[in-house]
Amino acid sequence: MEDVKLLVTSIILSGIKKKSKKNPIKTNSRRKRSCMKAVQINSYSKNIDTVLSDIAQPEISDFEVLIRVKAAAVNPLELLILTGSVKLIQDYPMPLTLGNECSGIIEEVGSKVTGFQQGDRVYTRLPLHKIGAFAEYVAVDQDAIAKMPEGYDFATAAAIPLTGLTAYQAITEELEAKPGQTLLIPGGSGSFGQMAVPIAKALGLRVIVTGNARAKEQFLAMGVDRYMDYQQENYWEQLSDIDYVIDTLGSAEFEHELSVLKKGGRLVSLRTGPNKTFAVQNHFSGLKKLLFTLAGRKYDKAAGKQGKEYRFLFVRSNGAQLQKITEIVEQQQIKPAIDSHVFSLAQANEALQLVAKGPLNGKVIIKM
């Protein structure tokens, strides 16, 4: 069963792609492409060993824009990609330019792009099958981008898409939460919680977070309804009849999280593992569907016995949702924490080492 779970986890980390308009025919080829700097790997390796390469600027298709990258966030996902942990399904051709989210300025638009123009300040969580944010330029489908929050700098904006979309999709799609209901986020005092709490409050939810003592005042200032220091109190001994739980901790916490849910409540995990519902929602078939079903059977069965429901989420790119997040960010003035160590493209190895080993005090950023 562990082997099945490991296999399915690798599949999930390869990314979930929604259908979108694509045109493989390249346009705007009349513009001569210059060279650019890009952080790449030449092969998968257990060691962090990137190289700064000179490569051609990407060409764009009809539905894409060319972004001059100003800042890119460094995530644990980069480590999974460069070590080859995702190659079972998403086996990237080499050399590969790393980077999953960024902010920047549109330099060029495809012939069928609508709603964006040259000079727009935009940000994006790149589709996992076409990454490349650690570069001076990146080509991105218009469906994956949104205009940056007004008045935000590029570094702060680059730290928003991945966690913002994760929170939004968890709350609105997987939990289908309604205003007035209660959401619990165990272990929510990190970068995810910094985005999830104000988004949840903006959507009308009552929010409870467990985390470390040093983050308590920060989260109370965000408007969290209750903050529980995990070293002082066990939430499963004090809470009950909770409508929804977002799991950030993984399978070891599953029983505790399930126990505080009311009958009919729903738990969505970002880490525990996929299940049959996840496979059906994402239109998997054959072997993949079977693997997802087997991997999640334990959690589906445990939840079902108590009249509750288990879900799994892996965030996907979505420009329309990112635009809604932008509106919430502007209204609530959400400012994700940025680590004090800021890196250049030439220092990508150091940035990745910091993400791998810590300690961190916010999102790690590469500035161009």
Image (cartoon, rainbow, N blue to C red):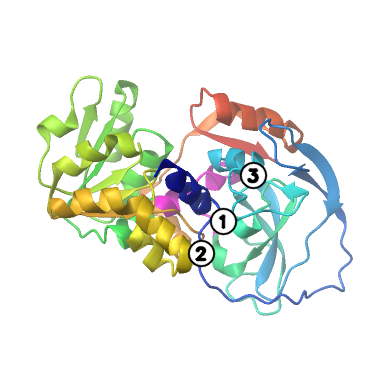
Of callouts 1 and 3, which one flags the residue occurring earlier in the amino acid sequence? 3
Q: Which residue position is annotated with label 3? A: 71
Determine contact: label 1, label 2, CB under 8 Å: yes
Locate the C terminus by quadrant. top right
Q: Which residue position is annotated with label 1? A: 124
Measuring from the top left, give residue 4's x and y in whole percent: 44, 48
Compared to residue 250, the image places residue 105 above or below, namely below
Which type of secondary structure does the marked residue at label 2 adopt?
Answer: helix
Amino acid at dot 1? Thr
Measuring from the top left, give residue 236's x and y in whole percent: 16, 33
Determine contact: label 1, label 3, CB under 8 Å: no
Residue extent of the magenta highlight = 147-166
Which type of secondary structure does the marked residue at label 1 adopt?
Answer: strand
Q: CA distance from mark 1 to mark 2?
A: 7 Å
The reply to whether the magenta stretch includes residue 153 is yes
Q: Quadrant of residue 56?
A: bottom right
Q: Quadrant of residue 224?
A: top left
Locate the N terminus by quadrant. top left
Residue furthest top in the image: 232
Residue depicted at x 54% and y 38%: 76
Measuring from the top left, give residue 203's x and y in whole percent: 27, 56
* Side of 361 relative to 123 (left or right): left
Q: CA distance from mark 3 to mark 2?
A: 18 Å
Amino acid at dot 3? Ala
Q: Which residue position is annotated with label 2? A: 319
